[in-house]
Image (spheres, helix red, strand yellow):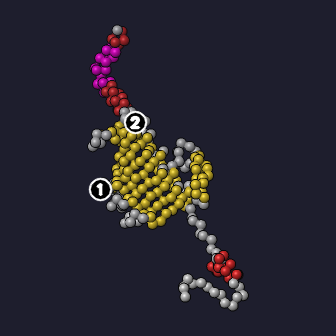
Amino acid sequence: MRDRNNWQSRFVLIAHHPLLMRLFFISLLLISLHGFSQSPAYIIGVKGDTLNRVDAKGMKQGKWVNHVDELRGEPGYEEEGVYKDGRKEGPWRIYSLEGDLKGLEFYRWGNKDGNCQYFNPSGNLVREESWKALNPDKLYDTLEVEDVDHLNQYRTVIVKNEGVAIKNGIWKFYDPSTGMINRTQTYTMGKLETLKAPAVQDSTQVAQEKLVKPKEVQDYEKKNAGKKKIRVRDGQTN
């Protein structure tokens, strides 16, 4: 009861002093703003989904839609996907500002990972990229790399982690009118591989190989060697 009376006495004292009253309300306002800043922020999408949510630690979580305006001649776009602890995770779709699908990317730890596809305005596939994500929480990472000279054979490589994705695997470039592959590029841990040119045979060796006769012909010529006249059956009847 005594504590309650003390608080009542203090409030009456503040109420009778305008300066103290003003400081009191400013303190309440600061407390309210601090509490609001710690609350998660989000928006509600057209389908009623919770989008663009930020948790109490300021990290992006769940479904997000990012909008990028046109800048310096580069076309604008929108992308939608999922954030996990502030990092992109899983499939992300990229759309033009007109609503056309431009790309389908996959992420892990906030970096591109796996096959990413890109399309022209007509929806035809024009490029397919292959990426390998590195875990940014590790100083070094371990990768299984396929030997380009011996398919289905792999070697373990330890790389320093720069916190970014690296090109790794086959990149394919398509003719959008036919859907056929125009060319390919192979990357191993960010390095573009060059195909080995086939060995060039000596012209004399090639000529000798062309002159080698079948065994049956050699046996026939050996059997009839030295004979002046060789009778050959041609299947005709007299």
Nearest to the observer: residue 28 or residue 189: 189
Left or right of 231: which side holds 79? left
- Say which element carries label 2: loop
Where is mark 1, residue-wise?
Answer: 98
Residue 2 drawn at (x, y percent): 36, 9
* Image-quadrant location for residue 179: bottom left
Residue at 34 percent of width and 55 percent of height: 101
Residue at 49 percent of width and 63 percent of height: 184
Residue 114 lies in the magenta-colored region: no
Q: Residue furthest right?
A: 226
Disc 1 vs disc 2: which is toward the camera?
1
Quadrant of the snapshot with the N terminus: top left
The residue segment tinted magenta is 7-22
Residue at 28 percent of width and 42 percent of height: 47
Nearest to the observer: residue 203 or residue 88: 203
Query: Dot 1: few (<14), some (14–19), or many (≥20) neighbours within 10 Å?
Result: few
User: Residue 55: which disc?
Assistant: 2
Disc 2 residue type (three-letter): Asp
User: Magenta segment, principal secondary structure?
Assistant: helix
Q: Would you place residue 224 above or below residue 97 in this image?
A: below
